[in-house]
Image (spheres, rainbow, N blue to C red):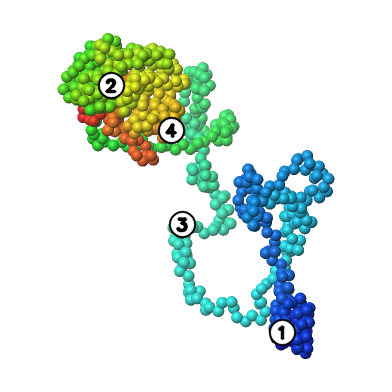
Amino acid sequence: MRIKDMSDGEGSDSEDYPSIRDSDSEGEESDSSGDEGVINTSDNDGAASDSGDDDDESDSSELGEGVEESDSSEDEVVPRNTVGDVPLEWYRDEKHIGYDIKGKKIKKKEKEDKLQSFLASADDSKNWRKIYDEYNDEEVELTKEDIKSISRLLEGKAPHGDFDPYAPYVDWFKWDDSKHPLSNAPEPKRRFIPSKSESKLVNKIKLAIRKGLIKPKKSKEEEEDEESVYPLWEDDSNSTEKNNHLTYIPAPKPKLPGHEESFNPSLEYIPTQEEVNSYQLMYEEDRPKFIPKRFANMRSIPAYENAVKECFERCLDLYLCPRVRKKRLNIDPESLKPKLPSRTELKPYPVACYLEYRGHEDAVTSVSVEASGQWIASGSLDGTLRIWEVETGRCVKICDIGEAVKYVAWNPNPEHSIVAVSAGQDILLLNPGCGTEEVQKRTKELLSVEMPMPDDSASSVSWLHDDKLEGIRLRHSKTVASVEWHRKGDYLSTVMPAGESRAIFIHKLSKKFTQTLSFKLHGVAVTSVFHPTRSFFFISTKKIIRVYDLVKDGKLVKKLETGLREVSSIAVHPSGDHIIVGSREGKLCWFDMDLSSKPYKTLKLHQKDINNVSFHRLYPLFATCSDDCTAYVFHGMVYSDLNQNPLIVPLEILRGHTSSNGRGVLDCKFHPRQPWLFTSGADSVIRLYCN
């Protein structure tokens, strides 16, 4: 039998495995008694087999019992909740906290009353051992072993008491009777050849000694000899103290004695008795400290009476007076100037006066250019509106407004020919009669629509029809300062500085509707401008420019602080991200809205007030005009790369207007397609400057 041979061969191991020993003895009985032995074995093991081959099965079952006694991590209790690493906050509003191993919901236990739980904990002596397990929603009582492990962890020890942190070192390598080395490789040849790197180092040291960079160490006798002898009149700047102190500054040498201090000076250095008496009348600061005297020989020279005093003052100067080394900066002033491109590279831009438009009898306050660039409109204090042809300078139409015109703005939509005129408290929308028949037809239909009845309770603006001028009259409650069109030509904004909270109005031409923007401006409104591409609206007060979003119910987007005394005009770059601001003190501010709310650059240009600023739609040009009878033209390039700053280059100063009543150039506008500039002055002349 196989079991019997195993018991004979391993008799000593049978004592450790009683199940195997029993099976061996049963196997011997089965050999002697035949089927009876098999029946007895099956009865003792509780098996249900009738054949003699069941001995192997009984052996395997008994061996399996021995294996079941092993300790492994698989015998740990499986958690009741199987949701994994899911946060329990997800089940805060649910009636369950997870799912068990069968997939059924684990319902939450009802929370006990705080008073009842407190009384129960007070009566329970083992309450301090209980811990609430949120994951499985149950209380767990710690055993004594768990408490011991926790206390050992708090003390900084290992959790198990059987762990020995200072166990003896076990050397796993056997060094006894070792005859061969760990590596039997032969010695390399480089160990028997002189090192090349060491020879290079020796050569470097030899060269340094020859050049005097490395000096051999001196003996103590030589050092003592050098310390005892030193140059008396050597300059302190070459002393060793300079090397020991990084910020060493040598003390200034006292003035050496001259001919006056000689014991036998020449007669020209010896003062007379009258000069000596005059010294006594002088202030002590101005009085000479030493008066020369003449002696016959060296033995008759007395002791110097101020020797101790001057030595003491010299020591005070050396000790108390600070010495600072000042570095002189040799900088070429030309190198500090910014490197700007040549003006010839920045052409075209307006340079000289090409045409003059004469006809107004008083100062021309405003000028505006039609969208195609063929016509311009001008308004004057003589109460007239004139339409001019750009290329010929011919006056096409004259409209008698009857009141001084302050502002003129041409509709930017080429499908309509409408000019907005600001005169006193009214805004006139007139048809200048320019354009094709289709444009005139659409313009007349837009201006001939029946007006709604004025409602003063809803708005401070009344829409009226002007039969004399064949247009629309917007009657405001107070004087209107400026008019600006939207890029689509259907909206226009008006600024009424004396209106306080109702100072800004937006009018819709197609529906004859007026909307009041009740913004808290915290100041007097000066002008307003629409954004060229977005739904932003710029409103300028005397010191601050505010940007609102009209789509989001007038939400304040940005607040630009100019730092100027009083803002006179603003202009927005065609990209919409840059603004220029003119002031009454002759300064120009350039704002980069993506960069900061403070000016990117502030330029002091004109000697008097800046009346208007303007951007060109196509060319990188902008211009300013002032009461000093000049107009400045600049190159203002804005790059698509946000890391590159805008390039601002002054190009030309345009002159030609004359002063009248202290006023100069009142307005300037660029041609929409050409690099031309129109200026209107107080001398009742409009000038066209071309390249």
User: Is label 1 in a helix, a strand or a loop?
Assistant: loop
The CA span between labels 2 and 4 is 42 Å
Sequence-wise, which precedes: disc 2 or disc 4? 2
Residue 251 seen anywhere in this rendered image of the structure:
yes
Q: Residue at x 76, y 77 (%)?
A: 45
User: Is label 4 in a helix, a strand or a loop?
Assistant: loop
**Which of the labelled discs sits on residue 596, or is there none?**
4
**Residue at the disc numbered 3:** 212
Quadrant in which the N terminus is drawn: bottom right
The CA span between labels 3 and 2 is 99 Å
Instruction: Name the outermost residue toward the bottom.
Output: 32
Sequence-wise, which precedes: disc 3 or disc 4? 3
- Camera-near label (3 vs 2) is 2
> In terms of image quadrants, where is residue 336?
top left
Q: Is residue 235 left or right of residue 178?
A: left
> In terms of image quadrants, where is residue 82?
bottom right
Callout 4 amino acid: Ser
Disc 2 crowd, CA 10 A, few/some/many (<14, 14-19, 20+):
some
**Residue at the disc numbered 1:** 52
- From what the image shows, is residue 336 above or below residue 506? below
| Residue 462 picture location, percent across and down | 36, 14
Sequence-wise, which precedes: disc 1 or disc 2? 1
